[in-house]
Structures are given as C-alpha cells and as structure tokens.
C-alpha cells in the first residue's frame, strides 16, 4: 500500500503561541511527521483543506511554498517506494535521512550490535559470521530485503549443504537468523509486515541426538585418580560440580564466587539469560568446592584472576571461551583414561544431569525451574532422549 501525505498542524503551540506545520505521512496505518519549519496562528489554518486561510498575510505565496515542500517530499517517498516495494514507514523515514533501512546487511549488523549491547557477546560473534557468510554468497553487502526471495533461500540452503559441506543443523541455524532479521525489520517498521520469503520455506530435518553420560560413566570419572596432574584434576572437579550442582552452565561455574554460596544453596544470575536462580546443592557438590576453600580465590575454581572485571562483557566472553577450551582439552584425556567412548565436554554434563534427573523421577516442571528454561519444550527434549533410549532397548529384544 502506497504512503499518503497531508499538511497538518501540530497539536500544541510553540512558545510564541503559533502552531508548527508538519507533513504527515501514513502507510499501513502507521504515521510519522516531517517538519516544514513553518508556523501559523491557529485561526489562520484551514484544517479541511490543509492550507492557510486568505486571512493569513501573503497566503497565496505561503500556500505555494507549503505545496512545493509537500510535493518534493511526496516525490522522495514515491521514488523510495518504487525502488523497494517491501519498504516500511520507518524504512522510508530512515532512507530520507540517509540511513538505508532496506539494506539487509546493515539491518543484520544493527541486530548484531543490539545483541552486543545486551551483553550477548557470543551470540553477536556467531551472527557476525552468519552475516559475512551470507554476504559472500550474495557477492555483495549492498542488497535489499526485496532481493531475498523464496528462490534465494532455497539456493542458499543448497549451497551451504553441497558446496560448503555444512551439516543440516548449520544450514538451519544460518537461515533461522536470516528469518530473524526479517522479523526484526518488520518489528522496527523498516519493511512491510507482509514481506516474508519464509512463508512456504521448509527447514531441513535433523536427527541430532543429545548425548549424555549414564550414572555408571559419572562414577568412572569420580573414581579416576588424576591428583598428580593439577589441570586434569581441576577439570574433573569442575565438570563433576556442574553435574552435582544441577547442570549449571560452564560460564556460570567459572564466574561462581563464594558469595554465591549461602547455606549450601547457590544464588546467582545466569549469564546467558539474565534470570535469577537459587537452589540447594547436593552434598557431593559441596564436597567438591570445599577443597578450594584454602586457596582463598575470589572465583571458586580459580580459572579467573581475583581482580577480573566482570563488567567488561567482551573480556568475560573471551576468557570464558579460553578457559572452556582448556577444560574440554583436559576432558579428552579423562575420557580416554576412563574408557568413555563419547565426546566429553562441559555442556555434556548439563545434558547428563537433566536426563538422569528425569530418569530418577524428577518432574519436567521442577527440572525446567532448575535449568531455567524459558519454555518447557526445551526441557521436554530430555524426555525424548529417554524415550529414544527405551525404544532402542526394546528393539534389541527377541520376543
């Protein structure tokens, strides 16, 4: 739907008692105003005709000037709409101001920066790679939302799988972010709400399994004597603490301070979601951290220096990534020594706690509260893992 323009008076007078004249732009029931930098007495304005009355001094010349401004602005809006049919009201406004809101990569980077400002540094970095990858496919950074149609999405999906040899999960992740950029642009009114090349698009089916350690494998790790190799021992302690503390994420464990432990309960703000959590620690979790009391570290496990500034989100993300890589490297040694033929990682312990807790009778609602999932469907994934395990065992029966 094309935008409509009209000369109108502002609702309130200025300090001189005169009313500013604006060009009102309406598109899809949305409105914005462009100042003409002109004012008029209320009695001299004809509201129905959108111009000054003959009672205004030099009314004919003044009306001609206003009409010229309106026509010039109308031509700008029309040219922008003709250039990109998908553009929204705020997109028009930004383009007139020299800020191109229909450029996909610019809006995608705006969203990326939004993640960064919100402290989601890891997410910001990941989507930055997705933007770069998509721009390389499009062979430009100067393409609009209108340039991305259903065929573009299908061809890009094929390119990811066939030329780049990426997994289906990677293709889905990349394309879901592109869809998120469209939704963000619609919400910000940069493009029209009906601009949606994903309407009939289907993401690839994936059969990724969420692995976990069974209690017997947890027992093997507990029994492993690696006290003579300090960095292996610390890695062992931290993953067992993850498991026995309710599946805490590695980022929260690395940032854990003694002040977060009160009367054998953990109280903290989850780094990934910003949600508050508080729950009782198991006796085994308490036993693990008690070994670190004599070291007098501010951060319990001592991976971060005592004077580390946790307000610097970029540095926090960098040091967590670095420490996690060191721990995961140590876990390869632990897996080999324990004879565990699984890819041992810090995140696997979170999955292991959730799956084993459900197996031992914990309800989905309680588990959701401990893991601080925003949607119970995230928690139900672990129930599906258990069902798959049961189904696999049933298939082995020879009845």
Image (cartoon, helix red, strand yellow):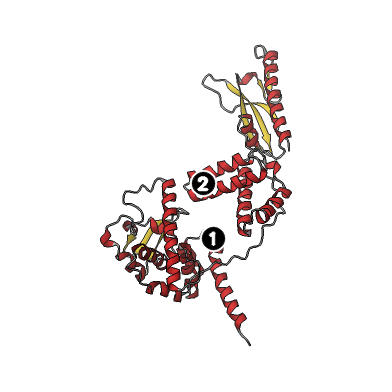
- Residue of label 1: 375
Taking depth in this image into account, of 260 and 193 the one nearest to the observer is 260
Where is residue 177? Give x, y as percent.
60, 50
At 51% from the left and 21% from the top, the residue drawn is 15
Taking depth in this image into account, of 29 and 283 the one nearest to the observer is 283
Taking depth in this image into account, of 42 and 311 the one nearest to the observer is 311
Quadrant in the rendering for residue 58: top right
Question: Which image quarter is the C terminus in?
Answer: bottom right
Tell me the tag on residue 109.
none
Q: Mark 1 or mark 2: which comes first in sequence?
A: 2
Residue at the limit of the structure toward the top, as seen here: 58
Seen in the picture, residue 77 relative to 233 is either above or below; the reply is above
- Count of residue discs: 2
Q: What element carries label 1?
A: loop
Q: What element carries label 2?
A: helix
At 27% from the left and 59% from the top, the residue drawn is 295
Where is residue 314? Give x, y as percent.
44, 46
- Image side of residue 228 versus residue 97, left or right: left
Seen in the picture, residue 385 relative to 147 is either above or below; the reply is below
- Residue of label 2: 115
Quadrant in the rendering for residue 223: bottom left
Circle 2: is it few (<14), some (14-19), or many (20+) Cα within 10 Å? some
Between tags 1 and 2, which lies in front? 2
Circle 1: is it few (<14), some (14-19), or many (20+) Cα within 10 Å? few
Residue 362 seen in render: no
- Image side of residue 263 versus residue 15, left or right: left
Q: Distance between the residues labelled 1 and 2?
A: 21 Å
At 64% from the left and 18% from the top, the residue drawn is 44
Question: Which image quarter is the N terminus in?
Answer: top right
Residue at the limit of the structure toward the bottom, as seen here: 399
């Amino acid at each position: 739907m094309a935008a409509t323009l009209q000369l109108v008076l502002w609702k309130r007078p200025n300090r001189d008692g005169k009313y500013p004249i604006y060009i009102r732009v309406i598109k899809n029931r949305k409105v914005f105003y462009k100042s003409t930098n002109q004012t008029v007495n209320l009695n001299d304005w004809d509201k129905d005709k959108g111009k000054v009355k003959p009672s205004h001094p030099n009314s004919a010349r003044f009306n001609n000037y206003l009409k010229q401004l309106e026509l010039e602005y109308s031509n700008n809006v029309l040219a922008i709409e003709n250039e990109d049919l998908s553009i929204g009201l705020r997109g028009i406004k930004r383009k007139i101001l020299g800020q191109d809101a229909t450029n996909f990569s610019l809006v995608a980077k705006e969203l990326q920066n939004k993640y960064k400002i919100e402290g989601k540094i890891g997410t910001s970095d990941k989507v930055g790679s997705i933007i770069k990858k998509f721009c390389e496919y499009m062979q430009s950074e100067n393409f609009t939302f209108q340039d991305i149609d259903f065929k573009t999405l299908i061809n890009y999906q094929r390119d990811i799988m066939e030329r780049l040899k990426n997994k289906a999960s990677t293709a889905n992740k990349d394309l879901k972010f592109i869809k998120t950029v469209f939704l963000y642009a619609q919400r910000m009114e940069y493009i029209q709400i009906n601009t949606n090349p994903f309407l009939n698009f289907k993401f690839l089916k994936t059969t990724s399994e969420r692995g976990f350690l069974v209690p017997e494998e947890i027992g093997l790790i507990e029994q492993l004597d690696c006290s003579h190799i300090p960095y292996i021992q610390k890695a062992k302690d931290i993953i067992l603490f993850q498991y026995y503390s309710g599946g805490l994420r590695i980022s929260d464990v690395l940032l854990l301070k003694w002040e977060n432990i009160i009367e054998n309960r953990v109280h903290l703000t989850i780094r990934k979601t910003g949600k508050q959590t508080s729950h009782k620690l198991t006796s085994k979790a308490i036993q693990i951290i008690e070994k670190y009391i004599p070291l007098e570290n501010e951060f319990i496990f001592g991976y971060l220096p005592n004077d580390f500034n946790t307000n610097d989100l970029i540095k926090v993300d960098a040091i967590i990534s670095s420490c996690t890589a060191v721990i995961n490297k140590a876990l390869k040694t632990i897996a080999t020594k324990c004879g565990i033929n699984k890819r041992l990682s810090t995140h696997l312990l979170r999955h292991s706690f959730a799956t084993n807790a459900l197996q031992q009778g914990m309800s989905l609602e309680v588990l959701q509260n401990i893991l601080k999932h925003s949607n119970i469907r995230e928690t139900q994934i672990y129930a599906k893992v258990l069902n798959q395990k049961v189904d696999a065992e049933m298939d082995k029966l020879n009845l």
